[in-house]
């Protein structure tokens, strides 16, 4: 990750955030902006992102906090998604499906986050803390990302994965607990189980091949 997720999430203004979200919706669902506007008027599921942005903005204004909390309740009622207003999400978020989606109030994400149904981003009790996600992260259906961990840029979390540890940039993780199965487009022969393992392999690679057992 090149910058802190919190910094990236805070940079754009509210209108820029919503504009980027609308662009992501139009591209993600392969519809024109005109058709998207009609769907936003008719279908509650398509309005969830806009409601979420309004709740996030309202939470930062003392007089609007009650309205922000009402909006989060409204989102849950119309879509089945529990999206906390305290989450700091960068521009271009794409919610593919809302059912069962949970995003905690301390979650931070960069640009172009993609979320599928039944995803949970939240804390890992009793440890506390919630995830920080980089840019261009995709979370597959049924995946769970918990605790004060960091997912790097361009990370893909496979469906039903359970992520409890940091994930480097450009990785695909799968399984429960999740392991790195691809990195920078290449399959990982022995899955990386943690950031410590990832760093350890880098140290061993820099040290060169081992000569243990060399008879010379």
Image (cartoon, grey):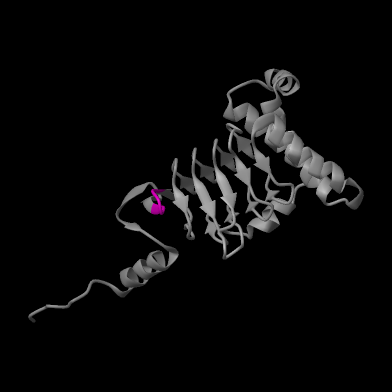
Which residue, as the protein is rendered here, is positioned at the far bottom?
216
Residue 121 lies in magenta, yes or no?
Answer: no
- Name the residue at 39% across, 53% down: 180
Q: Position of residue 205 (x, y in %)?
A: 32, 68
Q: Quadrant of residue 97?
A: top right
Say whether residue 154 is visible.
no
Note whether 40 is above or below 199 in the view shown: above
Percent x, y of residue 130? 61, 58
View extreme (left): residue: 215
The answer to whether residue 5 is above or below residue 206 is: above
* Residue placed most toward the observer, 191 or 44: 44
| Residue 108 seen in this snapshot | yes
Q: Is residue 66 left or right of residue 25?
A: right
Residue 158 is situated, as x and y percent measured from the top left of the image, at 44, 43
Question: Which quadrant holds residue 73?
Answer: top right
Q: Is residue 7 above or below residue 140?
A: below
The picture quadrant where one finds residue 83 is top right
Q: Is residue 204 left or right of residue 109?
A: left
Along the horizontal axis of the image, is 88 left or right of 173? Answer: right
Where in the figure is residue 85, as x and y percent of width and height?
74, 47
Image point (39%, 54%), residue name: 179
The residue that appears at 44% across and 64% down in the rendered structure is: 195
Quadrant that contains the C terminus: bottom left
- Look at the image and give the residue range highlighted in magenta: 174-179
């Amino acid at each position: 990750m090149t910058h802190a997720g919190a910094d990236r999430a805070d940079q754009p203004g509210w209108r820029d955030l919503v504009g980027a979200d609308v662009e992501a919706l139009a591209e993600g669902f392969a519809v024109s902006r005109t058709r998207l506007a009609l769907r936003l008027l008719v279908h509650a599921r398509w309005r969830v992102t806009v409601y979420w942005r309004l709740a996030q903005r309202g939470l930062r204004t003392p007089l609007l906090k009650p309205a922000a909390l009402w909006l989060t309740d409204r989102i849950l009622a119309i879509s089945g998604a529990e999206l906390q207003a305290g989450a700091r999400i960068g521009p271009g978020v794409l919610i593919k499906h809302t059912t069962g989606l949970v995003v905690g109030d301390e979650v931070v994400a960069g640009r172009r986050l993609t979320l599928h149904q039944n995803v949970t981003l939240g804390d890992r009790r009793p440890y506390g803390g919630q995830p920080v996600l980089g840019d261009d992260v995709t979370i597959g259906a049924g995946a769970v990302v918990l605790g004060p961990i960091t997912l790097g840029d361009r990370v893909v979390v496979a469906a039903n994965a359970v992520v409890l540890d940091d994930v480097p940039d450009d990785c695909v993780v799968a399984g429960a607990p999740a392991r790195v199965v691809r990195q920078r487009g290449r399959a990982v022969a022995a899955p990386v189980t943690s950031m410590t393992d990832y760093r350890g392999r880098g140290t061993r690679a820099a040290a060169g091949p081992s000569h243990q057992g060399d008879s010379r």
